[in-house]
Image (cartoon, helix red, strand yellow):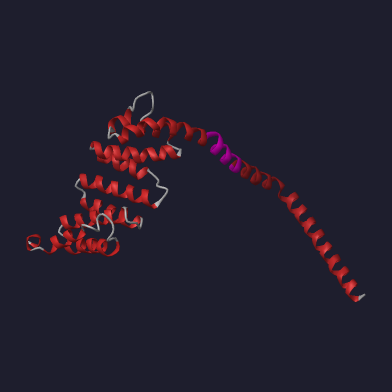
Amino acid sequence: MATIRRKKQVQDETLIDLSQAKVSAERFWEKNQKILLIILGGLFLVVGGYFFYRFVIVEPKQKEAVEQMFQAQLQFERDSFDLALNNPGGGYAGFLEIIDKYGSTPAGNTAHYYAGICYLHLGGFEDAISHLETFSPKDDITEAMKLGAIGDAYSELNQLDKALAQYVKAAGAADNNLTTPYFLLKTGQLHEKQGNREEARSAYARILAEYPDSEEGQEIEKYLARLESPSSQG
């Protein structure tokens, strides 16, 4: 019997607690109804606005941008960089028009990378840097490629310290046999050009130690040997 009474007492206490909580919540709602409605309304607008923006605006524009960019990509693959930028033909948009019309979409973001590489090949190095810096990579490899291309643009502008900083970042952006040794080699070559022999040796030695099977790793010993030759120490 004592156990039954105890259970009933606990149940009664629970009911009382729930009742009090309900009253408290109702009073809180009555007291703060206006501001709560404003907050909930704002949340609905944010959430609803997000889904509206994504599914009604962004996704249709993304699909349209991808369809429009197809011809520019073909021209890019053919190394027809001016056509890819401005007039790929067939009534399709070039990368600059894609950026202008669909800049908020993933395709518009990618178009910045394409545009940057086009300008790099066409000698518009400042424009190349601007577009590449605007591009937002989604993975480590494209981050490395972006940074390396910016480094190439600075190198062409003879701003070697800035180029070197980008190559160092590019080498550190990813860890793989493709981009890492490639940008380590560029880092070493630029150090060597600037007379920074120990820094160049360090970059080359890292390729030999960590990426010996890469394309750069299979040829890196000749770079190390060149640093040791009397003529290079001149």
Q: Is residue 152 above or below residue 192?
A: above
Residue 205, x across and y down, in percent:
23, 64
Q: Which residues are magenta?
A: 46-57
Residue 124 in sight: no
Residue 159, x across and y down, in percent:
21, 49
Q: Residue furthest bottom?
A: 2
Q: Is residue 48 magenta?
A: yes
Residue 210 in sight: yes
Place residue 164 in its image quadrant. Answer: bottom left
Residue appearing at x 31%, y 56% in the figure: 180
Of residues 180 and 129, the one drawn nearer to the viewer in this rendering: 180
Q: Is residue 209 magenta?
A: no
Of residues 168 and 13, the one drawn nearer to the viewer in this rendering: 168
Q: Residue furthest top?
A: 91
Residue appearing at x 85%, y 66% in the figure: 11
Q: Is residue 102 left or right of residue 86?
A: right
Q: Is residue 83 above or below residue 21?
A: above
Quadrant of the frame with the C terminus: bottom left
Q: Is residue 223 left or right of residue 183?
A: left
Examine the residues drawn in magenta and state their main secondary structure.
helix
Residue appearing at x 39%, y 26% in the figure: 92
Q: Is residue 203 above or below residue 107?
A: below
Of residues 207 and 95, the one drawn nearer to the viewer in this rendering: 207
Of residues 57 and 71, the one drawn nearer to the viewer in this rendering: 71
Q: Is residue 61 left or right of residue 226?
A: right
Place residue 96 in its image quadrant. Answer: top left
Residue 128, x across and y down, in percent:
29, 40
